[in-house]
Amino acid sequence: MIATMEHCHGTLIRLTKLTDTSWIVHWFTAGHGLIKTVAKGARSPKSPFAGKLDLFFDAEISWARARSGELHGLREVSVTCTREPIRCDYNAMLLSGYWCRLLELLIERDHPEPELAALLGRGLDHVAERGASVRAMQHFEQELARNLGIMRERKQAAGALRDALGSLPPQRAQLLERLSPGRDFPVAETETGDLK
C-alpha cells in the first residue's frame, strides 16, 4: 500500500531529537492543525533538509501520511520565511515558544485550524519585527481564548486558558518578570495590543 502524500504550508513549532541523525519536526498548519513528521537524516550536514528546519520557520512541506500512528514521513521542505530576528532575542524566543506550547496543549492533532494558524503567523511576524512585549502576549491569549470559545465576560483571557488547561506553561511567569522591569505588581491582565 502506497502512503498518501500531503502538501501544505506550515510553521515549525518544535524540534525533538529522534536519533543521532533524525528529528521529529512539529508543525502547525491551517489545513491539518498540529502534525508531527520524521525528518530522517536531517541532522546530517549533507541532508537535503540542512538549513531548512529551525524554530518558527514557515515552509511549504510535503509528507507521507503514516499508515498508523501520528509520525508522518517528511519528504520536502521549501522555506518561505525564517523570522531570523526571533532567534537573536531571548525574550522573543521565550514568547514565541510560549504561544506554540499553548497551541500544542489546546489543539487536537490533525484537525484543521485556519484561524489559529493565521493568529500564530501574525504573532510571530509581530515579534520578529517589534520584539516581545506583555501587550503582545496578552493579545495573543485573548484572541486564542476567543477563538476557542472559552472567553467569558469579565473573565481575563489568561484565567480562561488556565481553567481550560489546569495551569499555564511556566514560560508565562518568566515572561511577565522579564518584560515588566521595575514593576512591583503584576501587569494588568486587561492590557491588550495589536498583532498587525
Image (cartoon, rainbow, N blue to C red):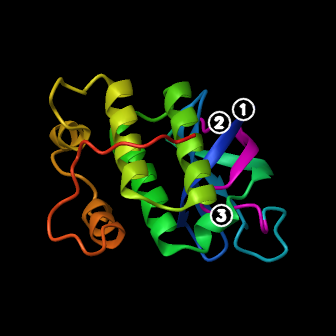
Q: Is residue 62 magenta?
A: yes
Q: Nearer the viewer, mark 2 or mark 3?
A: 3
Residue located beneath label 1 in the image = 6
Camera-nearest residue between 171 and 17? 171
Quarter occupied by residue 28 = top right
Q: Nearer the viewer, mark 3 or mark 1?
A: 3
Q: Residues within 10 Å of mark 3 (few under 14, many from 20)?
A: some
Quarter occupied by residue 109 = top left
Query: Seen in the image, is 66 located left or right of residue 91?
Result: right
User: What's the residue at 30%, 22% (across, down)?
Assistant: 149
Q: Residues within 10 Å of mark 1 (few under 14, many from 20)?
A: some
Q: CA distance from mark 2 to mark 3?
A: 22 Å
Number of dots carrying numbers: 3
**Element type at mark 3:** loop
Q: Amino acid at mark 2?
A: Arg
Q: Residues within 10 Å of mark 2 (few under 14, many from 20)?
A: some
Camera-nearest residue between 192 and 57? 192
Query: Which numbered disc covers residue 54?
Result: 3
Q: Is residue 115 visible?
A: yes
Q: What secondary structure do most residues of the magenta stretch adopt?
A: loop
Camera-nearest residue between 7 and 186? 186
Residue 76 vertical placement versus 7 (above, below): below
Q: Is residue 112 visible?
A: no
Q: Are marks 2 and 3 in contact (CB under 8 Å)?
A: no
User: What's the residue at 27%, 70% (across, down)?
Assistant: 177
Q: Which residues are magenta?
A: 50-67
Residue located beneath label 2 in the image = 65
Sooner in the amino-acid sequence: mark 2 or mark 1: 1
Where does the image place residue 143, in percent across and percent down from the top left? 39, 33
